[in-house]
Amino acid sequence: MEQNNGVRGQIIGNISDLYKIKYNSGYINCKARGIFKKDNLKPLVGDNVIFDPEKEIITELLPRKNELVRPPICNIDQALIVMSVEEPKLDFYLLDKMISIISYNNINVIICFTKLDLLDQSKEDEINEYIKYYKKIGYKVVINNQLEEVHKLLKNKITAVTGQSGVGKSSLLNRLDKNLNLKTAEISHALGRGKHTTRHVELIEIGDCLIADTPGFSSLDFYNMNKEDIRNSMIEFTEYMDDCKYRDCFHLKEDGCKIKELVSKGIILSSRYSNYKKFIQEEEDANGKDIRFRTIKKQ
Ligand SMILES: Nc1nc2c(ncn2[C@@H]2O[C@H](COP(=O)(O)OP(=O)(O)OP(=O)(O)O)[C@@H](O)[C@H]2O)c(=O)[nH]1
Ligand SMILES: [Mg+2]
Ligand SMILES: [Zn+2]
């Protein structure tokens, strides 16, 4: 394990300038070397690092296989997108956006719906139709009370749990491991949203799973994704787009567009298509204003 006079480990937590590192002999809290700041590099939870155990300093960041801005984490195998059907209300726009951003970063997507107990029967049937659709186009979909199923999907993987504040991310992890006791809180009924109870990204070992609980967010940006990236991240569009009249069809105003035809026939979910159009519009607006790296966080 000795490399460059240092020891290799993985960052599993971070509070201000202290990084908690897991390595062979246990855990250690280290600071980052000044040089990272100079290079504008910030160590992330998930980073594999070389550190000096005596000086308690991270000396080297090893290459990342992937990286997300929100939640700030890297080197994960998959993301579990948690989406409540009530409190906060189901938001397919946000779900589709998370799916696009995460898959663009080469990270597998699992969708987990929560709070189905708050729905009446008729709405539950509607949710089941959506679940079927997302499964059909290739995503794994679970419900938070299918604990065994959830556990199976997380086994031997590094997973980031992500989603809006108050959807039940920490609650789900507490149910997977009864000894965990992560802080959870009721959502604010006045505002209809969560209270940002989880403040830090932390990788937690639950049996043979390494799972990151992360702070919820209220909005998301496409960061460095351009229009092509957004289009190509709509998984079922890519499957049919060879049948569009134009090879580089954006499925917007073009004629002979197979995607638009499939939307009108109800084969492609119309919410997916209208969210896609919103994404493209947002990208155009942001790009026009040259602020593609905005991060907006409403508290
Ligand atoms: N009715 C119902 N409530 C749930 C369910 N899952 C979680 N909750 C409740 O939802 C509230 C928010 O849960 P948290 O686990 O704190 O949510 P979170 O996603 O971790 O939120 P942040 O840490 O703020 O991002 C808590 O009051 C939970 O008890 C569910 O399946 N049904
Ligand atoms: Mg939480
Ligand atoms: Zn098209």
Image: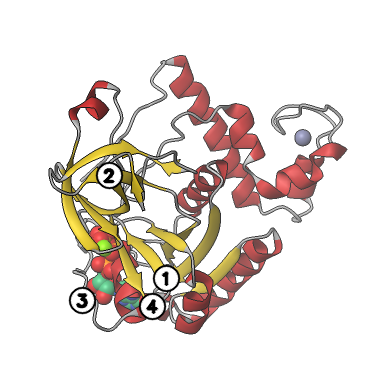
Instruction: Measuring from the top left, give residue 182's x and y in whole percent.
Output: 22, 71
Amino acid at circle 2 = Gly
Left or right of 256 in this view: 121 = left
In the drawing, what numbered circle is on residue 6?
2
Whichever of callouts 2 and 4 sits on the residue coming sooner in the sequence is: 2
Residue assigned mark 1 = 209
Label 4 Cα crowd, 10 Å radius (few <14 / some 14-19 / many 20+): few
Whichever of callouts 2 and 1 sits on the residue coming sooner in the sequence is: 2
Front residue of this view, candidates 34 and 25? 25
Spatial CA distance of label 3 from label 4 is 15 Å
Spatial CA distance of label 2 from label 1 is 27 Å
Mark 1 near mark 3, Cβ–Cβ under 8 Å?
A: no
Residue at the spot x=50%, y=57% of the render?
A: 78
Mark 4 near mark 1, Cβ–Cβ under 8 Å?
A: yes
Residue assigned mark 3 = 181
Amino acid at circle 4 = Gly
